[in-house]
Amino acid sequence: MFFATDFKAKMITVVLVLGLVGLCSVRAMGGPQSSAAQANPAQDTWRKEFNEVCSKTQAAMTFSQEELTDLILRCDALLPQIEKLDESQKKVYMGRLRMCRGLYAYVLDAKRNEKK
Amino acid sequence: MNQRIFIAAALILVFWGPALSQTGVKKKRPLPYEYGRVIIDNYSDKADLAPVVFEHWIHRSMFTCRVCHVDIGFAMKAGATGITAADNARGYYCGTCHNGKRVVDGKTVFQSSCSKKVTAEDAKRCQRCHSYGLKVASDFDFFQFSQPLPKERFGNGLDWEKSEELGLIKPASFLEGVSTSKGNAFVVQKDFALDPKVEGMPDIIFSHKKHTVWNGCELCHPDIFMGVKRGTVKYSMVDISLGKSCGACHTTVAFPLTDCQRCHSKPVQP
């Protein structure tokens, strides 16, 4: 009887300790978050960069050749991230990125042509 | 026998000849409310739905071209976007606004996603767009809408530019959560004249300012106008009428090529 009670208490302690260790390690590793929270940081990063880069098209004419080159490179860097998106999102943003990059490249070409 | 064949051939020629000669030659001029209409049938037929009838005039009265063709991502050629029901359901293309949530002009825009399993109530909603060949009453009446607007001779019979100037329409240039930039301050070149090929034809005055207000820059460059140096690319009326360069919009939605004076607007120098 005593043996059984002692064994039970030990088992409960082990389970509690294992649970605590598990909980701590999970938190230390960044923990499982809600799917929305998991999806948002990555999405926010590329969307933020996309908005930042492609919101400048209306002022493309005012940029220097260096600035335009930098914007084109930033567009190119966005491409692999957009390629990973779901089908619909990819279709929309690939098109938007193509137009945005295309304009910067076009204005850059025009500026190079002006100098000749 | 030979006489019979001869009579039959003659009859065919008399009755079918004129009918065949018309095929593909005469193009019916669209009525004002039909101008700009796009029939979209990429997948509708396969889904047992009528093709979509898209009315440009309704949408252009509320949004600039840029909002739909740059920010939302609709292609400039009819059917080229390849919109699917899944795209709409995920909140893209038509589903960007037609999601049952977005409010435009104080009205909640009806939801667009339509699947094969639909209730009778759903079917009514689906038919608001999938209406080709069906008699579907629209919430929008062109004649009522166009009544207070300044008139023009061709296309929709309306002067859209003046309508905006007078504040009779207010096309939004920004869509929350979709558009990247709120600004309308486009930095563009000054208006310039283009020499027409035909002698005596007035010069074309091209205004970048007028075009960027609704289109932005990337809608035209480089996809539609790719030449970087003025004068290097030659534009012909034949190409334009085939939908190239200016014809991308001015044969479909914007005032048509028959309205010569609106582009050939600079008087001939004596």
Image (spheres, coloured by chain):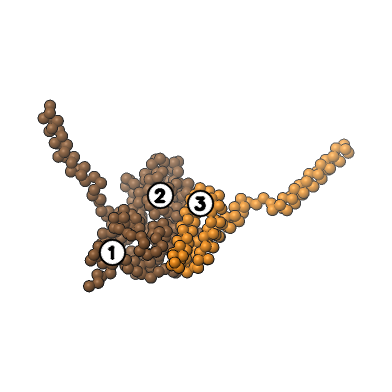
Chain colours: A orange, B brown
Residue A75 position, x and y percent, is 52, 58
Using the image, determine if residue B178 lies above or below residue B186.
above
Name the disc covering residue A89, or none: 3
Provide residue A84's location: percent of width, then percent of height.
55, 49
- Label 1 vs label 3, nearer the camera: 1
Amino acid type shown at disc 2? Ala
Which callout, 1 or 2, points at the residue further toward the start of the chain?
A: 2
- Amino acid under label 3? Gln
Residue found 46% across the figure and 65% down from its top: A112
Rendered image: mark on residue B181: none
Residue for point 43% across, 48% down: B83
**Number of numbered markers:** 3
How far apart in space, not on screen, are marks 1 and 3 (Cα)? 43 Å
Q: Chain of mark 3?
A: A
- Disc 2, SS: loop
In this rendering, which labeled residue sits more in front, label 3 or label 2?
2
Q: Which residue occupies 12% across, 28% down?
A: B2
Label 1 secondary element: loop
Q: Amino acid at mark 1?
A: Pro
Label 3 SS = helix
The C terminus of chain B is located in which quarter? bottom left
Give residue B149's position: percent from left, percent from top: 31, 65
What label does residue B80 carry, if any? Answer: 2
Furthest-right residue in this view: A2
Q: Quadrant of the N terminus of chain B?
A: top left
Kindly identify which residue carries mark 1: B196
**The disc numbered 1 marks a residue on which chain?**
B
